Amino acid sequence: MNIYVANIPFKASEEELKGLFQEFGSVDSARIITDKFTQRSRGFGFVEMTDETEAKKAIETLNGSDFMGKALVVNEAKPRTENSFEKGGNRGGGYNRSSHRN
């Protein structure tokens, strides 16, 4: 199961995040998302756990819990869809040629 984790402290490492979830079972991977230009943490990431029961227990227990001084937001990750940008990611703002025709 893929788990979304938000409000991760900027000083946290992927190993520390993985260790937190390993208390509930086997962790396949833990990844903190970084800014592609600065390489700094963006404050969220994903943890992959094989066993769904262990993953659900981790979500239930860790959501709202303190991790390095911050309250984590933990829930099941939703798969990306083709229209992810339409639902709020990209609001546009560019010039619309069709609305300025005579």
Image (tube, rainbow, N blue to C red):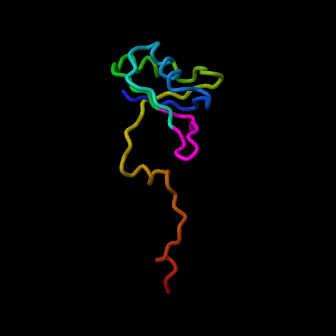
Q: Residue at x 54, y 29 (%)?
A: 73
Q: Magenta stretch: residue 38 in it?
A: yes
Give the image location of residue 53, x and y in percent.
36, 17
Give the image location of residue 31, x and y in percent.
46, 31
- Location of residue 2 with respect to 25 vertically, above or below: below
Give the image location of residue 97, x and y in percent.
48, 76
Image quarter hosting the N terminus: top left
Q: Magenta stretch: residue 35 in it?
A: yes
Q: Residue at x 66, y 22 (%)?
A: 69
In this view of the protein, which residue sits in the foreground, 14 or 83? 14
In this view of the protein, which residue sits in the foreground, 57 or 5? 5
Q: Quadrant of residue 29?
A: top left
Region rendered in magenta: 34-45
- Location of residue 64 with respect to 32 vertically, above or below: above
In this view of the protein, which residue sits in the foreground, 24 or 30? 30
Q: Is residue 69 left or right of residue 47?
A: right
Q: Quadrant of residue 56?
A: top left
Q: Residue extending furthest bottom?
A: 102
- Location of residue 73 with respect to 100 vertically, above or below: above
